[in-house]
Amino acid sequence: MEYKFMDFIKKNKYKIVLLVLAILFFCLYNYLNFSHQNIFNSPDETANFVLSKSFVETNKISYTLQNNFDKLNEFIHPRSTFVFGNNILPVSFITFIIVSGFVGKIFGTGIIVYLNSIFLILAVLAFFGINKKIFDEKVSFLSSVLFFMLPAVWYYLERSMFHNITFVSLVIIGLWFILCQPFRKQIWLSDLLGMSIFMLGVFMRPNEMTWIGLVFLFTIIYFKKQIKISRLIMWSSVAVFFVLMYVFANFYFYGSVSTGYVASNSLQVHKWYSLLFPFGFDFLMTIKSVWNYFFKMNILFGVSAFLSGIFFVYLFLKNKLNKVQKVYFVSLLVSSLFLFFYYGSNHDNLYNLKTVAVAYVRYWLPIFIGFLPIIVFFIIEVLKKIKNNVGKNLLYFVYIVVFFFLSFNIVYKGIDGVLAVDNQLKYMTEIKNWVVDNTSQDAIIVTDHEDKYFWPQRQIVVDFYNDSIGQTIPALLEKNAEMYYFVPKQTEEDYTKMLVYLAKFAFDVDVFQRFNSHTLYKLNLP
């Protein structure tokens, strides 16, 4: 009995270690969720959570306004949403909200904030299985360990209501079913489940379909002799079904095929390549973005990715990679170049922060993940010259430990690191509770950036100094709306600017409450 147990441990040692790490990292990933109840530090997260919860409770991905102010309704919504009639709807892609809502219906709304962590852990295990087929078990294991501690993964699991993690997780899990075929006697079932999960992941971010489609098509063409026509029919049928379902869902909820950034008015088609690169094609901006957010942010990862990339080009040219490894590497290069230019050409408003919270990091998640087995393969090849296994294993361990602490520093420190977010959420929770206790349920809060904290407990109007809002505020006050202006502590210049603005649009403010770093004004007609 003892022999069988030890034999089981020996055969499954890598899986056991990954499961232990999964438990440990689940706790790390959810530090903010354990510390704070349903309050988030970005409008995207707040919108995704509130509307997922709404789907659980009402079967709708919308939130109904407290009061109907007719044409003025269009101004009463937080960022990351818009108003249609009397309902607030998400600007972003709806698949994440629908999936979170369906799971919430089964297990309760409490699970919603933990879904990304669960999907990611399953994706790491799937990643381990896939890379065993492409490389070997050691490469697969070490790259899976690094997967857990990637700063891009770690940070956006702490910020648990972004859909980027769900996107990559479901795509990886789907590929595991397709490539590893867990139901060996019923390949059709593996393909059906795999392609369904894969497409569900794709439609978390349908604007990623271009590069995913290219990679998928390239792989099918390369392995056309090994792929049965029945499998192609299954994959195609499932893909078409999900496309139709996505179109139907958008028509049902929006009356339009496109939502999210694809439908955004900010993305105009000015040149022939704008359909492929809606943010433009800026070579210099891309180089700067890649340097700052892919290489420089985590210098250990950046240097490792650069050296391993060169090493794989050498192996490719010398024909020292097997067929599957060649396809993997070419697919990684093509998708990386596309994603670098697609998102790197965009000058993000927060570009100069150069932190993990800036959007480039989460948009390049597939690249960070894709390079992991390349990096590990390179390290193993380099260390083959060391004959002492103890010394070799010690170097692996040192690399992982250094990688962990660098990642920890990136994720937790800095102006928008987890510790700063934690302090901000504590502060804003106190303010939110005070505001909820001291204003009516129908009250409207006007604010520029703090909408994410007050909604949906209070109605929101954003962009105070927008002239359209300046006209809307007195119009709402004339309809007896209870309104407040929440603003960071003002300088004399800020206060003077506000007085000029008030005079221009003929309404007044009175100090309602002062907080440590903010002031809440009551808005009134003269």
Image: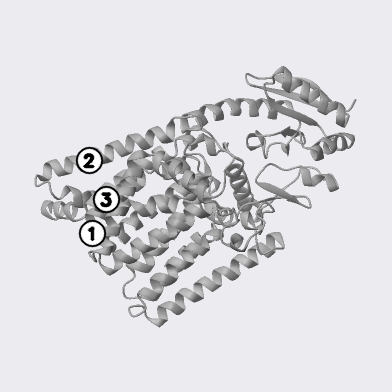
Find numbered disc 2 in the image and state the secondary structure of the residue it sits on: helix
- Image height of 116 relative to 179, above or below: above
Residue bearing mark 1: 136
Tell me the quarter of the picture where residue 316 sits: bottom left
- Image height of 439 relative to 369, above or below: above
Q: Camera-side residue: 31 or 491?
A: 491
- Image height of 66 relative to 313, above or below: above
Label 3 or label 2, whichever comes before in sequence order:
3
Which mark is drawn over residue 498?
none
Q: Would residue 15 be seen by someone viewing this image from the given angle?
A: no
Find numbered disc 1 in the image and state the secondary structure of the residue it sits on: loop
Which mark is drawn over residue 397?
2
Name the amino acid type tagged 3.
Answer: Val
Frontmost of labels 3 and 2 is: 3
Q: Distance between the residues labelled 3 and 2?
A: 12 Å
Where is residue 18 drawn, in percent x and y? 29, 48
Q: Would residue 207 be seen by someone viewing this image from the given angle?
A: yes
Label 1 or label 2, whichever comes before in sequence order:
1
**Residue occupying the far bottom of the picture:** 229
Q: How far apart are marks 1 and 2 (CA)?
A: 19 Å
Q: Residues within 10 Å of mark 2 (few under 14, many from 20)?
A: few
Residue bearing mark 3: 376
